[in-house]
Amino acid sequence: MRVDVVSIFPEYLAPLDLSLIGKARRDGILDVRVHDLRDFAHDRHRTVDDSPFGGGAGMVMKPEPWAEALAAVAASGPAGDAVVPHLIVPGPGGVPFSQALARALADEPWLAFACGRYEGLDERVYEHAADRMPVTVVSLGDYVLNGGEVAVLAMVEAVARLLPGVVGNAESLVEESHEDGLLEYPVYTRPASWDDAGTVRGVPSVLLSGDHGAIAGWRHAQRLERTAARRPDLLPASATAGALADLDVRVATPADAAELLVLQRACWVREGLGALGRWVVPPLVEELPDVVAGLREWATYVARVRTADGSPGRLVASVRGRVRPVDATFWEVGRLMVAPDLQGRGLGRELLALGESLAPSSATGFWLTTGVLEEGNQRFYQRAGYRLVAGEPTHPGAVDLTKRRR
Ligand code: SAM
């Protein structure tokens, strides 16, 4: 990939010679060329700025040096080729830079960056450039920097590390924060037990178990939990759409366990009467420690009624999901429950969609289990695209259903 950067502080871009990005340049994966904007200003003081029309604080970057600099960059492309760079102008008013944008830019053969300073570029520079090349204004975040150089360092690093051959282990890119729209799970290394000046800090035992299915499940649940805690805005849109939007939906914690137990008793009591003396219905026999243990094994969401003062309202619905322990290609959705007085309002459908949306990208299908006597539930799942699985069910008195992921 070719990258051109135009700046009045070319030395600001020196870190692009270091570490993996520097190595990518030396390996010929990345061709970075830094240009001094002042080389395109021809007065004695190599002036690139002037006061703003209409008055006001600060200075504005003049259009002529920019037009000349961009023409020089464009002309230095492959000889005889009509290829032009995609011009990225860093600016606090641009589209937010994101992992998705980094991925899109990593597919482009040539990027040029125009680093503004002062109050920014004369607006006509954007018009001039847009007549000649694709132009995108990109913001690093909702704050103001002194110049575009820091933003360019961040963007070039985020884009370049996605190029094949830049990061040694390409797999390490897959489960990072913002891939899949979630934050990364916590990571640990040796020692397994760290004596931190008298406080012994261990590592979650599942990571030492060697059980890869359990580890994948734990990691995915951690990603969901961390995202819900730190960046709820990133959670699947289904968590905040439709009738569910009227409720307060969040990842369950042990503090929710007692109400979850009450809710599951209420939701399964009818099935329990049908099963009476014939088989055991797990949601009816589990006790509080089982529900708490379930929270560790499954990513569980609970929905509460919103209250005027923001205090926790009644827990009225829940769904959970996990990588199916016996077959990691399936995402298992379970304990879909809506309080009896709120059933029939479409909440179940939305919860099912939420439960499915929690699946890792590696899952190729969904799996769920419901009561053999619960024909209404079976029809509900079949309407959602599930098909009955033939053969022995996972539990006595149950049927299994699956759906291919689209
Ligand atoms: N007056 C401009 C405004 O309010 O939008 C801010 C100009 S800023 C002081 C100078 C330069 O820093 C900008 O032209 C841009 O290149 C860069 N810059 C500042 N904040 C940025 C951000 N959040 N993302 C990307 N670039 C930024």
Image (cartoon, grey):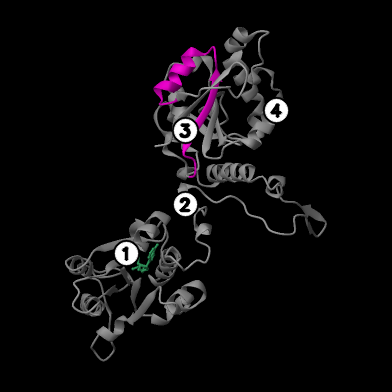
Q: CA distance from mark 4 to mark 1?
A: 52 Å
Residue 381 is situated, as x and y percent measured from the top left of the image, at: 45, 22
Q: Quadrant of the C terminus?
A: top left
Q: Nearer the viewer, residue 279 or 197?
A: 279
Q: Secondary structure at mark 3?
A: helix
Residue 371 is situated, as x and y percent measured from the top left of the image, at: 56, 17
Q: Which quadrant of the picture is home to ligand 1?
A: bottom left
Q: Earlier in the sequence, mark 3 or mark 4?
A: 4
Q: Residues within 10 Å of mark 2 (few under 14, many from 20)?
A: some
Q: How many marks?
A: 4
Q: Earlier in the sequence, mark 2 or mark 4?
A: 2
Q: Residues within 10 Å of mark 1 (few under 14, many from 20)?
A: few
Residue topped by disc 3: 354
Q: Residues within 10 Å of mark 3 (few under 14, many from 20)?
A: many
Looking at the picture, which amino acid does disc 2 mark? Glu
Residue topped by disc 1: 108
72 in relation to 87, above or below: below
Q: Residue at x 49, y 54 (%)?
A: 174
Q: Nearer the viewer, residue 314 or 210?
A: 210
Image-based side of 105 in relation to 388, left or right: left
For residue 233, say whether it is visible: yes
Of badges 1 and 3, nearer the viewer stands 1
Identify the mark at residue 290; answer none if there is no mark: 4
Magenta part of the chain: 362-386
Q: Secondary structure at mark 4?
A: helix
